[in-house]
Image (tube, rainbow, N blue to C red):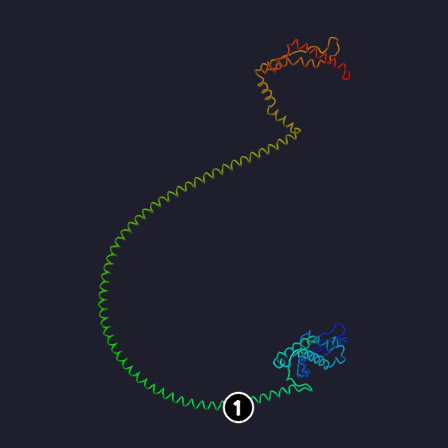
């Protein structure tokens, strides 16, 4: 086991057993079955002269210098380490992957490819006018491709465009610009000489014009000054007169104002004297009114206090009476509730006692008989029944329907029917005698007893004959 430490501008790339692909470290213990490789993260300059062709089929050389190096984060360093170790897919086809030329070849291919793609869609005029935009497009496109290898563009410098071998486009363009600048210089020199001569003549004429104008203005100013002086003198005289008149008017106005002020002060004094007298009389009236009002207020307050006391006393009495009534009703309700509660408790205890007695006497029937004997119920019932029929005179009727045997000594089969029919007349007669209820009216239409007896005999004989013959004969 060996302990490895990297330099400040280096990283350790550990590969071997226990590591899936690579392990990036600044310090590490290296096992015997592992391998350590040092990679530098210092940027390197890459110069190239790119041959490109515009959309107009114009060829040119584009000198450029790129400063490129690994991006200082673990993900980018891992990609860069894989690139150097040959595990990247794009690096397996190159046998010289361990050298720095391998990385430069990859960067050169990316820069040339992306730059040609951009230039092929632009004109030469666009490249000249938009140099900064063209440079930024090249950097952005190249950076997108370099990011997959963990590389980063730290700086890029695109130099002046040059003619490709066999092309003189920029030479002629420079000559054209030179000749144009020379001709323009000659034209500008002639224009400057002409402007100088014209300017000199204009300056001389302007000088004369200014001298004449100044002389005329001087004469005008002198005349104006004299006129202004005369006007100033006249104004001074007028002003002096106005001031004198103003002073006299101010003196007269001051005198009139003093007289008016004196009259006004005299009037004010009289007014104040009258107001003082009026206030004195008003104060006397107010004092009398105030005294009368205070007396009335005191009388009203006394009456209000007396009525308030009476109302409070009446309210207190009503309240005390209501409280007493409520207290009495509450106590009565409590007493009634207590009495009912005790009565219910007594009934419950009595029911328990009766239940125990029923168990001893053999059931509720035995308890009922015991209670009737205990309370002399049987004697009272007998006495009540005797009192119920006391004084009654019942009428008892006894009648006989005769012997049940016939003359021949044999049993009469119609005896029951005959006896029933013979009982009806004396039965209705007895009911009428004892209750006063008359028999139905149809019984009054019945034949006399002798006729009834004859009819009964005939009916009995017919019934007996029908019985003897049977239903089939």
Question: Which of 450/294 is in front?
Answer: 450
Q: Residues within 10 Å of mark 1 (few under 14, many from 20)?
A: few
Q: Can you say which quadrant of the picture contains the N terminus?
A: bottom right
Which image quadrant is residue 420 in?
A: top right
x then y, percent, for residue 74? 68, 74
Count of marks placed on residues = 1
Question: Which of 431/296 is in front?
Answer: 431
Vertical side of 443 occupied by 60: above or below: below
Which image quadrant is residue 446 in?
A: top right
Q: Residue at x 60, y 21 (%)?
A: 381
Q: Residue at x 59, y 25 (%)?
A: 375
Direction from residue 175 to residue 323 in the image, left or right: left
Q: Residue at x 57, y 89 (%)?
A: 183
Question: Which of 469/338 is in front?
Answer: 469
Q: Can you say which quadrant of the picture contains the C terminus?
A: top right
x then y, percent, for residue 5? 70, 78
x then y, percent, for residue 21? 74, 73
Vertical side of 340 occupied by 413: above or below: above
Question: Which of 457/401 is in front?
Answer: 457
x then y, percent, for residue 262? 22, 66
Provide the residue designation for mark 1.
190
Which image quadrant is residue 220 in?
A: bottom left
Vertical side of 60 occupied by 324: above or below: above
- Element type where label 1 sits in the image: helix
Direction from residue 193 to residue 127 in the image, left or right: right
């Amino acid at each position: 086991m060996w302990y490895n430490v990297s330099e400040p501008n280096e990283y350790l790339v550990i590969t071997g057993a226990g590591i899936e692909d690579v392990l990036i470290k600044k310090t590490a213990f290296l096992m015997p079955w592992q391998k350590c490789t040092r990679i530098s993260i210092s940027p390197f300059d890459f110069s190239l002269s790119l041959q490109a062709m515009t959309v107009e089929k114009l060829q040119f050389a584009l000198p450029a210098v790129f400063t490129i190096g690994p991006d200082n984060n673990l993900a980018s360093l891992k990609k860069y380490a894989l690139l150097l170790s040959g595990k990247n897919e794009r690096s397996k086809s190159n046998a010289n992957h361990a050298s720095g030329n391998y990385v430069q070849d990859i960067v050169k291919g990316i820069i040339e490819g992306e730059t040609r793609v951009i230039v092929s869609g632009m004109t030469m005029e666009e490249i000249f006018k938009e140099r900064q935009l063209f440079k930024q497009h090249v950097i952005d496109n190249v950076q997108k491709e370099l990011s997959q290898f963990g590389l980063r563009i730290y700086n890029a410098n695109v130099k002046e465009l040059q003619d490709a071998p066999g092309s003189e486009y920029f030479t002629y363009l420079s000559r054209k610009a030179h000749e144009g600048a020379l001709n323009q210089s000659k034209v500008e020199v002639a224009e400057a000489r002409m402007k100088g001569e014209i300017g000199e003549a204009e300056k001389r004429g302007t000088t004369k014009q200014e001298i004449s104008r100044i002389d005329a203005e001087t004469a005008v100013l002198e005349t104006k000054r004299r006129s202004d002086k005369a006007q100033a003198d006249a104004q001074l005289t007028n002003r002096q007169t106005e001031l004198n008149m103003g002073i006299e008017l101010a003196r007269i106005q001051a005198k009139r104002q003093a007289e008016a002020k004196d009259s006004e002060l005299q009037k004010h004094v009289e007014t104040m004297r009258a107001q003082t007298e009026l206030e004195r009389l008003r104060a006397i009236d107010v004092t009398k009114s105030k005294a009368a009002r205070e007396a009335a207020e005191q009388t009203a307050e006394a009456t209000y206090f007396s009525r308030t006391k009476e109302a409070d006393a009446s309210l207190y009495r009503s309240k005390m009476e209501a409280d007493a009534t409520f207290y009495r009703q509450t106590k009565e309700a409590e007493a009634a509730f207590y009495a009912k509660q005790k009565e219910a408790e007594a009934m419950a205890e009595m029911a328990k006692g009766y239940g125990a007695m029923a168990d001893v006497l053999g059931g509720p029937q035995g308890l009922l008989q015991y209670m009737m004997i205990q309370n002399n119920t049987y004697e009272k019932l007998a006495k009540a029944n005797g009192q119920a029929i006391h004084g009654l005179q019942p009428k008892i009727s006894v009648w006989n329907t005769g012997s049940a045997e016939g003359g021949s000594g044999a049993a009469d089969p119609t005896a029951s029917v005959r006896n029933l029919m013979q009982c009806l007349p004396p039965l209705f007669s007895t009911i009428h005698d004892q209750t006063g209820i008359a028999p139905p009216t149809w019984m009054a239409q019945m034949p006399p007893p002798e006729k009834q007896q004859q009819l009964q005999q005939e009916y009995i004989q017919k019934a007996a004959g029908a019985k003897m013959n049977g239903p089939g004969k």
